[in-house]
Amino acid sequence: MTIASTATPLSQPMDPSDVDYFGLKITQVGDELPPGREPILEADEVVTSYTLTMGVEAVAAGLKILGGDKAPSLADRLLVFWLEIEDGMEADPIFYVGLTLPVELTVVTSKGRTKQRTATVRVVNL
């Protein structure tokens, strides 16, 4: 699967042995956005529910979203989530050069709209 050029890159790369958190802002009309990107929410909308899933490439590379006390959480339009590579895959040679892996966010809004966006995380031996 090809990752869209409009996917939002997450801020920092991740080493395959890291267990780290990332933040993804759910954009709204009025937010400053890069060219070609549209906000998820209209000015008077809020997120009523969301799901965060791995793209096919991310699953194949062993990237996973943590749960429990590190489960995704949303506050003030900032979605915070923790990622790690599955045990036993950290030393896989695919990470020598590095991979850009997709994370899919789907939100349902207070107006009943469903919007999906892709973010990417770079996983590389650091």
Image (tube, grey):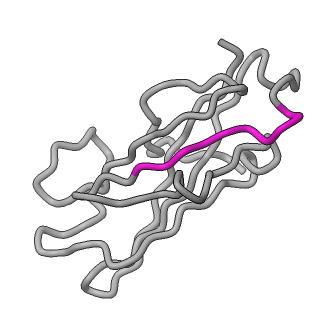
Q: How many callouts does the rendering have?
A: 0
- Give the answer, above or below, for where 44 lies relative to 28: below
Location of residue 3 (image quadrant): top right
Up the image or down, 93 lies above or below 108; here it is above
What residue is drawn where x is 62% and y is 52%?
Answer: 66
Give 25 or 87, whichever is nearer the viewer: 87
Q: Quadrant of residue 33?
A: top left
Please name the residue shown 12% across and 74% down the image: 44
Magenta portion: prevailing SS class: strand
Q: Residue furthest front?
A: 69
Q: Is residue 109 magenta?
A: no
Q: Quadrant of the C terminus?
A: top right
In the depicted structure, whether residue 34 falls above or below residue 104 = above
Q: Is residue 85 magenta?
A: yes
- The residue furthest top is 126
Q: Is residue 74 positioned above or below 124 on the image?
A: below
Which residue is painted at 22% across and 58% down in the image? 76
Q: Position of residue 100 (x, y in %)?
A: 64, 33
Residue at x 71% of width, y 26% of height: 17
Which range of residues does the magenta coloring cover? Answer: 80-89
- Residue 73 placement (x, y as % from top left): 41, 59
Asked whether, in this view, residue 14 is left or right of residue 9, the answer is: right
Left or right for 6, reference 40: right
Residue 50 image point, x, y percent? 44, 71
Q: Is residue 67 left or right of residue 6?
A: right
Image x and y of residue 71, in percent: 53, 57
Q: Which corner quadrant of the image does residue 74 belong to? A: bottom left
